[in-house]
Amino acid sequence: MTASFQILILGYGEMGHAMEYLLKDHYQLAIWEKFPIDGFSSAVIEESAPHADIVLFCLPVNPHQEVVQQIALLLKKTCLCVSIAKGLDETGKTAAQIFSENLAEHQPYALLYGPMISEEIRAGRYAF
């Protein structure tokens, strides 16, 4: 394991599991889940966000605004926020619009779109 980057995965659904599979052997991970299932120990978002070099939003677009507002002031200036969410929230905003409106002007962010099949990723097969 390389501890050069600390990555905070937000959401432990299909894509959260896939990102864990891809990254666990190479980076230090913290995984936060708002509604954890029995046996899963969720990271405390307020404790993990200040240490993250990358925050992966493996959430639908709807909770992005709430979560971004919760962590925006805690993030390092160099922390990259990445959303994999496609579509719009209930007000018609994209993840990019939510990031733009709620993150500090200096905060880098990116969007990762495309047909990603979490089952294929976790099985070690290629996915786009």
Image (cartoon, rainbow, N blue to C red):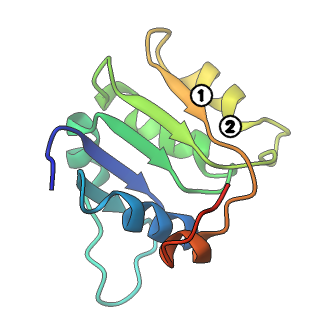
> Does 2 appear above or below 41?
above
Q: Is residue 6 visible?
A: yes
Q: Position of residue 55 (x, y in %)?
A: 40, 41
> Could you tell me if the residues under marks 2 and 1 are in contact, i.e. CB atoms within 8 Å?
yes
> Does 44 appear above or below 81?
below
Q: Position of residue 24 (x, y in %)?
A: 28, 62
Badge 1, how many Cα within 10 Å: few under 14, some, many 20+?
A: many
- The label number, if any, that marks residue 127 in the structure image: none
- The C terminus lies in which quarter of the figure? bottom right
Q: Position of residue 94 (x, y in %)?
A: 76, 36
* Distance in Å between CA atoms under marks 2 and 1: 6 Å
- The kind of residue on which mark 2 rests is Ala
Please tell me which residue is depicted at 52% across the width and 26% down the height of the picture. 109
Residue found farthest to the bottom: 38
Who is closer to the viewer here, 77 or 119? 119
Badge 2, how many Cα within 10 Å: few under 14, some, many 20+?
A: many
Who is closer to the viewer here, 3 or 40? 3
Q: Is residue 12 visible?
A: no
- The kind of residue on which mark 1 rests is Phe
Mark 2 element type: helix
Mark 1 element type: helix
- The N terminus lies in which quarter of the figure? bottom left
Give the residue number, with chain letter if any, for mark 1. Answer: 99
Who is closer to the viewer here, 16 or 101? 16
Q: Position of residue 44 (x, y in %)?
A: 25, 57
Please tell me which residue is depicted at 27% across the width and 24% down the height of the picture. 76
- On screen, residue 44 versus residue 117, left or right, reads left
Please tell me which residue is depicted at 14% across the width and 45% down the height of the picture. 3
Give the residue number, with chain letter if any, for mark 2. Answer: 95
Please tell me which residue is depicted at 46% across the width and 73% down the height of the picture. 35
